[in-house]
Image (cartoon, rainbow, N blue to C red):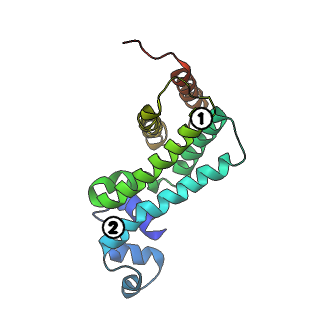
Amino acid sequence: MSAARVVGEFGYRDASIQRITADAGMAQGTFYLYFASRQALFDELLPHFGLHMLEHVRERAHGKSDFFEIEEIGARAVFAYLQENPWFWRVLNEAEVEAPAAWARHHEEVVRRYLKFLKRARQAGVITLYREDELDTLAYLLIAARDYLYLYHLHRSKQNSGIPESVVRTYMQFVRGGLNALPATD
């Protein structure tokens, strides 16, 4: 957690081993019992906390079966996680440059889970207007929508008031309409 907090505050480039170990309350030498280098830590940071976020989402939606209800719960859970863990946004976004292997692992896992969710919905007859080979594009569209809504509404908010209800309502209207609308004819 110390590494995540330090990266969240200072960024990967200025997240020194000294800062991380000071935040953790341990000696710098102890760090090397667990990680061969600062980069080795960075390569584990996003995948570790990314899985933590995905489990947070999964736990919130556990036991639900309606696709749109799960999608709304999932969106709310992501927004809540990001609000409770403001450091995650910087860990996530700077990783593409500072820990590209970690960034790729994290995104592969997010897309894999989202794609599995969309495939189940398609098999259940909820998503009928998209072919199987179009579901990965849908996954990326929905992930990107959430990312930009977070960036606009939470990350920039100074009062830490959470995501406005109108944003969730608009997002879900977009999801329902986009998945239920007829495809364009060629």
Q: What residue type is labelled 2?
A: Ala
Q: Is residue 18 above or below residue 137?
A: below
Which element is circle 1 on?
helix
Q: Which residue lies furthest to the top in this view?
A: 185
Which element is circle 2 on?
loop
Q: Residue 47, how many percent across, how many down?
A: 44, 61
The residue indicated by pointer 2 is 15
Cα–Cα span, label 1 and label 2: 45 Å
Q: Dot 2 surroundings within 10 Å: few (below 14), some, or many (20 or more)? A: some
Q: Which amino acid does label 1 sit on?
A: Gln
Q: Nearer the viewer, residue 145 or 123?
A: 123
Query: Hey, which quadrant is residue 97 in on the image?
Result: bottom left
Please name the residue shown 48% across and 38% down the image: 146
Q: Nearer the viewer, residue 185 or 10?
A: 185
Q: Which of marks 1 and 2 is nearer the N terminus?
A: 2
Please name the residue shown 29% across and 65% down the image: 14
The residue indicated by pointer 1 is 123
Query: Hey, which quadrant is residue 144 in on the image?
Result: top left
